[in-house]
Image (tube, rainbow, N blue to C red):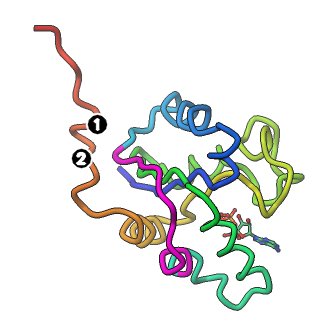
């Protein structure tokens, strides 16, 4: 089983798309281990996007991701990193296939609604940057069946 870090970016929160996005992953069969509305600090943003530090768009990327609340999540399931990346779609909305989140709802590359980890290692680093260990339920807890009395 694999964990991944997903984040509805400020444009997705402002457009009221949290529920729509969460529903897609729930219906796919992934389990939500943690989720919170939060404002990303500049320090967290720079750690999150460290691989883009030398890129010309780094400054605007940091301003954008810290500009308003995001909805940060941890999901777990088989092949969750690859599955969620394919459900999110290409970075550039014009390349994102219809049926993907960006393909259905995003227009601009710099306002592409959602982030998803690109590897298991990135997911571990990104989760640790945004969550404390005790904010996550376990996969066993997330899959436990509710029973009638
Ligand atoms: N050439 C670019 N010009 C402007 N913004 C860009 C460019 N390339 C990437 N970005 C922005 O930086 C973010 C991170 O880029 P990355 O290549 O990691 O894409 P991604 O993995 O699809 O997106 P994310 O990391 O947000 O999930 C993109 O989501 C996009 O908003």
- Which residue: 78% across, 41% down? 105
Q: Residue at x 36, y 48 (%)?
A: 34
Q: Are marks 2 and 1 in contact (CB under 8 Å)?
A: yes
Rendered residue at 21%/57% (across/down): 134
Can you identify the residue that label 1 sits on?
Answer: 142
Outermost residue, bottom side: 54
Circle 2: element type: loop
Quote the CA–CA distance across marks 2 and 1.
6 Å
Q: Position of residue 58 (x, y in %)?
A: 71, 81
Position of the C terminus by quadrant: top left
Where are the magenta residues, as a range? 33-46
In front of the other: 123 or 129: 129
Q: What residue is shown with label 2?
A: 138
In the rendered image, the vertical position of residue 108 relative to residue 141, given as above or below = below
Bin the neighbour count of mark 2 within 10 Å (Cα to Cα): few under 14, some 14-19, many 20 and up. some
Q: Is mark 2 within 8 Å of ligand 1?
A: no
Q: Residues within 10 Å of mark 1 (few under 14, many from 20)?
A: some
Residue 33 placement (x, y as % from top left): 34, 45
């Amino acid at each position: 089983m694999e964990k991944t870090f997903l984040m509805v970016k400020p444009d997705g929160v402002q457009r009221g798309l949290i529920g729509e996005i969460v529903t897609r992953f729930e219906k796919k069969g992934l389990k939500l281990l943690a989720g919170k509305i939060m404002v990303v600090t500049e320090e967290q943003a720079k750690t999150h996007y460290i691989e883009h530090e030398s890129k010309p768009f780094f400054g605007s990327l940091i301003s954008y991701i810290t500009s308003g609340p995001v909805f940060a999540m941890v999901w777990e399931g088989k092949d969750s990193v690859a599955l969620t990346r394919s459900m999110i779609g290409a970075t550039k909305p014009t390349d994102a296939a219809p049926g993907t989140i960006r393909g259905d709802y995003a227009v601009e590359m710099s306002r592409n609604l959602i982030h998803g980890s690109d590897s298991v290692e990135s997911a571990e680093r990104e989760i640790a940057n945004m969550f404390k260990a005790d904010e996550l339920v376990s996969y066993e807890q997330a899959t436990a069946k509710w029973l009638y009395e």
